[in-house]
Image (tube, rainbow, N blue to C red):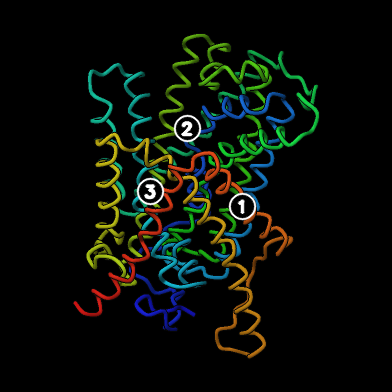
Amino acid sequence: MKRDAMNGEPAIPSDNPANPLARRLGLFDAAMIVMGGIIGSGIFMNPYVVARRVHTTPLILGCWLLGGLVALVGAFIYAELAAQRPYLVGGQYAYLREAYHPAVGFVYGWALLLVIQTGGMAAVAVTFAGYFREITHLPVSGKLIAAITLVLLTIINCIGVRAGSAVQNVLMVIKILAILMLIVCALWLVGMPNMSLTPALEHPLSLSLVAAFAAAMSPVLFTYGGWHTASFVAAEMRKPERDLSRGLLIGVLGVIVLYLAANVVYVGALGAAGLAQATTPASSVMHVALGERGARLMAVGIAVSTLGFLSQSMLTAPRVYFAMAEDKLFFKSVAWVGPRSRVPVIAIALQGTLAIAIALSRRYEQILDYVVSVDFIAYGLTATCLFVFRRRERQAVSSQSADRRVIGYRVPGHPYTTIFFTAICWAVVAGTVYSYPRNTVIGLGIMLAGIPVYFFWRWWRRNG
């Protein structure tokens, strides 16, 4: 049962299929959005960070396998949340609002706008601009290219969800082809001369080795992150109760296969020690396979991958701000839907404008340092929503309530898998606090600042 966003009291259920947004997305769109939210530039760069922290092939591949399993468990959890509440607008924001209190959802949306999504988009836009200049040699500043890119994606997504999704799908297919090209070229032209599964451990098992493995998991989990953003557009799927849960599982499984295969060819072509020295491992492997031409091809692939991530972010995140405005927790205009496009135009423009401002200000590096802790707090807390929804479901069934639902999807191994995922998420937060206390405190401070803002907004809307 939905709680009124202004006072937390029960209100009309929010999973009513009637909504002003156009339902034009299907299963393929859902799977591409999931994969697009995960695959950015991380898989082309971050493996060297992992190799510097754990120094043997089995441990490197073990990190990526465990990261994939964590992401898969997360996808299982979000798939059931999607089945439990298929028509909610805003996905993760709405789950937190429904399970706990509108203030909890607001704080997440606040952090998404000021830290998680906007800072990430600014950084990725600047990364794309760097590769674009390298490929084209245009005498234009990277900041200007980043700004123009964000403007164009904003306009495309304001045209309609179908236009935004079409661009996202095309870019996602190109991203998959780029990774497949890397894998095939490495296997065909380089082979696996440096693949060695021994020794499994560089040193005997100890606390320092466990700490090193945990440190290596941080960039892995960050690279696997982003699949949850597909839940933001559930209200624009034709059959969200079916397609969102299936899209989550298909998308995450596809990424796990691509990521594991990519890391196998990295260590096979470069060796564990060579991978640790290659700050751009994908380009290094392609250089070995095809020379300078291969490195340029990989630069194009990375540029397209970053552009696809930006496209996916512009497509999904504004739906959270739209949902907040519909709940009267944000400016009313942000809930405005274009009469022809049937998308939240003001919310999309807001996302694009803030990302451009951060990209031009060069403050995105600092903001990115805050992202990990805030993002993984939200992941773990959202997973606990499943316990709340299941308890309400049992109560509804036992009382023969009219709200009783038949859920078509269940998380395998719940509650153990859900507890495992939550514990991993909050362990990442604890590790980040330990390693980067100053930046983490700033990120948490920005997030917690949303609490007084929520109560001020509620008071202002009541008395305005």
The 10 Å Cα crowd at callout 1, few under 14, some 14 to 19, many 20 or more, is: many
How far from the left and from the top, in percent, is residue 391? 63, 77
Gap in angstroms between the C-alphas marked 2 and 1: 22 Å
- Asked if residue 263 lies left or right of residue 5, the reply is right
Q: Are marks 3 and 2 in contact (CB under 8 Å)?
A: no
- Asked if residue 317 lies left or right of residue 67, the reply is left
Above-or-below relation of 343 to 213: below
- Asked if residue 243 lies left or right of residue 353, the reply is right
How far from the left and from the top, in percent, is residue 386? 60, 67
The 10 Å Cα crowd at callout 2, few under 14, some 14 to 19, many 20 or more, is: many
The 10 Å Cα crowd at callout 3, few under 14, some 14 to 19, many 20 or more, is: many
The C terminus: image quadrant:
bottom left
Q: Which residue is mark 3?
A: 115
The label shown at residue 249 is: 1
Q: In terms of secondary structure, where does tag 3 sit?
A: helix
Q: Type of residue at label 1?
A: Leu
Mark sitting earlier along the chain (1/3): 3
Above-or-below relation of 201 to 114: above
Total tally of numbered discs in the picture: 3
Viewer can see residue 269 = no
How far from the left and from the top, in percent, is residue 420? 68, 55
Residue drawn at 51 percent across, 64 percent down = 240
How far from the left and from the top, in percent, is residue 113? 35, 53
- Asked if residue 57 lies left or right of residue 116, the reply is right
Q: Which residue is mark 2?
A: 41
Above-or-below relation of 119 to 184: below
Q: Type of residue at label 3?
A: Val
